[in-house]
Amino acid sequence: GWSSAGMTRKLVVRTLYRSMLKEIRGLTMNETKLYLHEKPQLSRWGHGQFVYNSSQVDALLKMLPPRVCTHAVEWSMTKRQELLPPPEQCMDGFNRAQLCRITREVFKRSKEAEDDKAVEAEDDAFAVLKLLTEQRQLQLSSSTCVTKGVRVRAVAVWVRKDMKGRGYFFCYRITIDNESEQTVQLIGRQWEILDENGAISGSVPKGTHGVVGLTPVLKP
């Protein structure tokens, strides 16, 4: 009956909400911030590009389901306190409070949705939970280092197993941000890929020219 369906829906929404908060706690342990990574795509292997004036807020809006994205923007425009933090407050990622605020609004939308919109709201909540889970995996397989104001981020994902039994395929992305006050240029690269035992399984020797054939100039 209607009552049973209503109770089931409330239970689903409540479970989703608790699962989202659990993922957020896991992502932000020890005051760690969640930096949103775009998942590396094998189809873009060997491609380089400049990204200007990107922010974590832009990345979040790009990743959220369209209905949730629209809801977040409308909420920010009509409330005194914005749901989405200013870009300058989350340049290095979102903290737990910011993530919980966004999640709370997604949850409230699912809880308060009319019957004809309930399924859509629940689908969006599942999509956000999936996003959090994927970002947690990317966070575990990423690293960052800052040297003289130049930040290098690396993230890797498993792609597939070699059908000939020779190993596994992984895809990685290297992102370089110039956070210094000087213009810099990438003229060469070197890195090593280690396996689970710390042994070198792949490398690019020191002094290798440019990156994907380019020597980009990065302005402050």
Image (cartoon, rainbow, N blue to C red):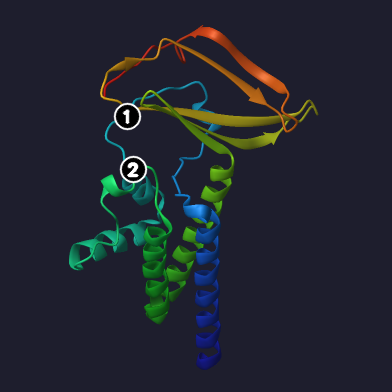
Indicate the position of residue 195 as horizontal and vertical percent values: 71, 29
Give 194 or 113, whichever is nearer the viewer: 194
Q: Amino acid at mark 2?
A: Met
Indicate which disc residue 179 carries: 1
- Name the residue located 50 percent from the left edge and 66 percent from the top edge: 21
The residue identified by callout 2 is: 91
Question: Seen in the image, is 92 located left or right of residue 161?
Answer: left
- Name the residue located 23 percent from the left edge and 65 percent from the top edge: 81
Indicate the position of residue 44 as horizontal and vertical percent values: 49, 28
Quadrant including the C terminus: top left
Quadrant in the picture for residue 100? bottom left
Quadrant in the picture for residue 116? bottom left
Q: Residues within 10 Å of mark 2 (few under 14, many from 20)?
A: few
Quadrant including the N terminus: bottom right
Return the disc, 2 or 1, that comes first in the chain's sequence.
Answer: 2
- Name the residue located 40 percent from the left edge and 46 percent from the top edge: 93
Q: Residues within 10 Å of mark 1 (few under 14, many from 20)?
A: some
- Name the residue located 38 percent from the left edge and 23 percent from the top edge: 148
Q: Amino acid at mark 1?
A: Glu
